[in-house]
Image (cartoon, grey):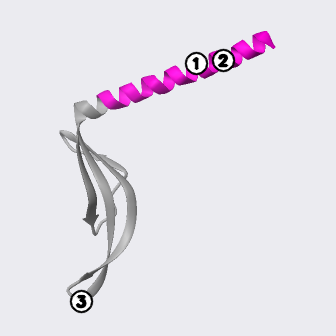
Amino acid sequence: MKKNKAVKSFVKPKDIWIDKYHVYVAENLKQIEEDINGNKEKQYEFDLTTYDKDEYIILEMQKNKQENQLAIAQLAMQMGGIQNG
């Protein structure tokens, strides 16, 4: 994983995009104006995280597993409250 802060682009990036080997995630997107050769130009500034595809898949699987475990725990607590109450 590689994190880049304050990346600038004239084109608004997608939140997430892929190529053959990587997944790119753009966050904290904001539109800025910058003086370029005496002209104010609108640009986008954002934080860009680059993952290897395999790394991204593993991270998403772990995240989903944690979310599922939390949902199961919450459901179990609710069911326990219904049975006991």
Residues marked 2 and 1 touching at CB (< 8 Å): yes
Q: Position of residue 81 (x, y in %)?
A: 74, 16
Mark drawn on residue 38: 3
Q: Amino acid at mark 3?
A: Gly
Please report the bounds of the magenta region as a residue range: 58-85
Q: What type of secondary structure mainly makes up the magenta span?
A: helix
Q: Which residue is mark 2?
A: 77
Q: Is residue 76 left or right of residue 68?
A: right
Q: CA distance from mark 2 to mark 1?
A: 6 Å
In the displayed orientation, state which residue is furthest to the bottom. Answer: 38
Q: Amino acid at mark 2?
A: Met
Q: Is residue 32 magenta?
A: no
Name the quadrant containing residue 42. bottom left
In the displayed orientation, state which residue is furthest to the right. Answer: 85
Q: Which residue is mark 1?
A: 73
Residue at left offset 27%, top offset 56%? 5
Name the quadrant containing residue 41. bottom left
Query: Judging from the image, what secondary structure is the residue with disc 3 in?
Result: loop
Compare residues 84 and 15 and report the one nearer the observer. 84
Q: Is residue 63 left or right of residue 34?
A: right
Q: Position of residue 14 (x, y in %)?
A: 35, 54
Q: CA distance from mark 3 to mark 2?
A: 62 Å
Residues marked 3 and 1 touching at CB (< 8 Å): no
